[in-house]
Image (tube, grey):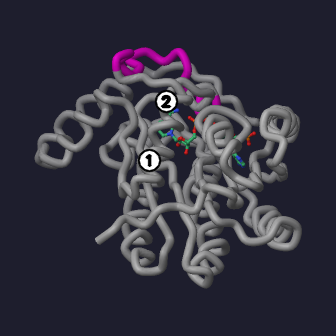
Amino acid sequence: MKPVRPPIDGGTALITGASSGIGRELARRLAPRTRNLVLVARRADRLEELRAELETSNPSLTVHTAACDLADEVATGAMLEWVSEGVGAVDVLVNNAGIGDQSLYDGADWTRVRQVLQVNVVALALLTHRLIPRMVERGRGGVLNLGSGAGHSFIPGAAAYTGAKHFVDGFTETLRLELAEAGVAVTQVCPGPVETEFDQAAGMEGLSGGPPEFLTITAEQCAREAIRGFERGDALVFPGFPYRVIMPLVGFIPRSLQRRTVRSTARSLRDAPQSRERDDR
Ligand SMILES: NC(=O)c1ccc[n+]([C@@H]2O[C@H](COP(=O)([O-])OP(=O)(O)OC[C@H]3O[C@@H](n4cnc5c(N)ncnc54)[C@H](OP(=O)(O)O)[C@@H]3O)[C@@H](O)[C@H]2O)c1
């Protein structure tokens, strides 16, 4: 069967988490090709800066900015109403916004856990639920979801985040099958370590035992490979050559062996409490 392609050219794309990192790079890559871009995040000043940059370099593009806290379901619903009335149908939805946390779950701050679940799971599911009916009605559309390598493994010290990304994996794969005959392309991008503000926002910056350098890629590379896979009709994109080679092999490691390895990491986390400062925006 021919893969379904997302209608990027001349269309309207909505990108969450466009104020930094991978989302900002995705916006820069989509800008020369789309007619309308809707940029969503909390930091309005960052979104305005990006709007000015993108409209200057792409004179036929209109950029709409929506400062919205995706952890707030009411605000998210209101933002979607505004998009529907003020911008119109969205052709391509990019669910990129995401936050992490770094804490053994028994010591986790519930407010933060709830935010992790609201932004990474509830907002992604809500935006998709609201925006895909018109894609199906018109027989064309695209959904690009940012998962993570965490959604294909078990990361001690990040149980809520890992669980959230496992949701993104199961949700996106199932959505893709449901929409296969409806003309809507669905792709999941699962990066490994990417140089962004993510670690700082999650309170992980400076912790010992960070990811190996050879696996780390730039946000620009991540966005480039994400869009390439999306346009090719891929179900799953692991950006960066080493990661693309390693991650499919994880599925072949018996769960019992994975548990043993992860358990020893969890033990060392419990034995070595580390000071952390999270950037609660
Ligand atoms: N960086 C990595 O190593 C890595 C690895 C695997 C997967 N990922 C995934 O990639 C995606 C993008 O992350 P990134 O690395 O680019 O991190 P980032 O630089 O911290 O960007 C996160 C984006 O999400 C937005 N966001 C966070 N909380 C929000 C909220 N409550 N409401 C609205 N927007 C919110 C942020 O904007 P505001 O702060 O302005 O709201 C920002 O634009 C995430 O889904 C992440 O899980 C990242």
Residue 36 coordinates in the image, percent (x, y):
77, 55
Q: In this view, does 209 lie above or below 280?
A: above
What residue is disc 1 on? 189
On whether ligand 1 comes within 8 Å of the CB at mark 1, the answer is yes
Q: Is residue 83 above or below residue 39?
A: below
Q: Give the quadrant of residue 13.
A: bottom right
Question: Helix or strand or loop: what does disc 1 sit on?
Answer: strand
**In screen coordinates, is 242 left or right of 18?**
left
Quadrant of the rendering where the C terminus is positioned: top right
Q: Label 1, label 2: how many angstroms apart (C-alpha)?
A: 12 Å
On whether ligand 1 comes within 8 Å of the CB at mark 2, the answer is no
Q: Main secondary structure of the magenta part?
A: loop
**In screen coordinates, is 106 left or right of 23?**
left
Residue 173 coordinates in the image, percent (x, y):
37, 64
Given residues 197 and 156, the one toward you in this image is: 197
Residue, x 17% and y 38% (percent of image)?
Answer: 260
Q: Do the residues labelled 1 and 2 touch (CB within 8 Å)?
A: no
Residue 139 coordinates in the image, percent (x, y):
55, 79
Q: Earlier in the sequence, mark 1 or mark 2?
A: 1
Residue, x 69% and y 42% (percent of image)?
Answer: 32
- Disc 1 residue type? Val
Residue, x 60% and y 56% (percent of image)?
Answer: 8
What residue is disc 2 on? 221
Residue 13, magenta (yes or no): no
User: Which quadrant of the render holds ligand 1?
Assistant: top right
Question: Helix or strand or loop: what does disc 2 sit on?
Answer: helix
Question: In the rendered structure, which segment of residues is drawn in magenta?
Answer: 201-214
